[in-house]
Amino acid sequence: MQLSTDDILLLLGILSLVFLLILLFNLIFVSVSLRRILRRADTVTKQVEQVVLKPISIADATVDWMSHLLEGGKDKSARKKAAKKKA
């Protein structure tokens, strides 16, 4: 049995379609895996951000508290000086 060129071209066309379907099927699995990996990376990034920002926010709150405390002390001393000048 001899194969003609039309038979060989038909076989090659069918094989290329099968390989294309296999490629598309694998691309679906790869894209789903990438979505899972990216979702996990996003979760890890948020956790790291929380760990880094928590001490910074505590330091910021402490600085704000100290500045309000010092500003409040300045206001009180300024009031006392003004009251002494009036008296």
Image: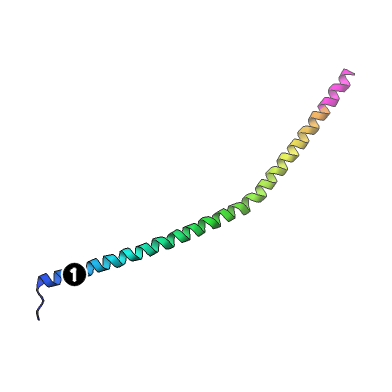
- The percent position of residue 59, horizontal first and vertical second, equals 69, 46
Q: Which residues are magenta?
A: 78-87
Which amino acid type is shown beneath numbered disc 1?
Leu
Compared to residue 31, the image places residue 2 above or below, namely below
Of 38 and 67, nearer the camera is 38
Q: Secondary structure at mark 1?
A: helix
The residue positioned farthest toward the top in the image shown: 86
**Badge 1: how crowded within 10 Å, few (<14), some, or many (20+)?**
few
Residue shown at 23% from the left, 66% from the top: 17
Residue shown at 27% from the left, 65% from the top: 20
The residue positioned farthest toward the bottom in the image shown: 1
Left or right of 71: which side holds 52?
A: left
Quarter of the C terminus within the rendering: top right
Q: Quadrant of residue 29?
A: bottom left
**Magenta stretch secondary structure, dominant:** helix
Compared to residue 2, the image places residue 50 above or below, namely above
- The percent position of residue 86, horizontal first and vertical second, equals 87, 18
Residue shown at 79% from the left, 29% from the top: 75
Q: Quadrant of residue 74?
A: top right
- The percent position of residue 52, horizontal first and vertical second, equals 62, 52
Taking the magenta stretch, the answer to whether it contains residue 8 is no
Left or right of 48: which side holds 35?
A: left
Taking the magenta stretch, the answer to whether it contains residue 84 is yes
Compared to residue 28, the image places residue 74 above or below, namely above
Compared to residue 19, the image places residue 73 above or below, namely above
- The percent position of residue 71, horizontal first and vertical second, equals 76, 33
Residue tagged 1 = 12
Left or right of 18: which side holds 61?
A: right
Of 46 and 76, nearer the camera is 46
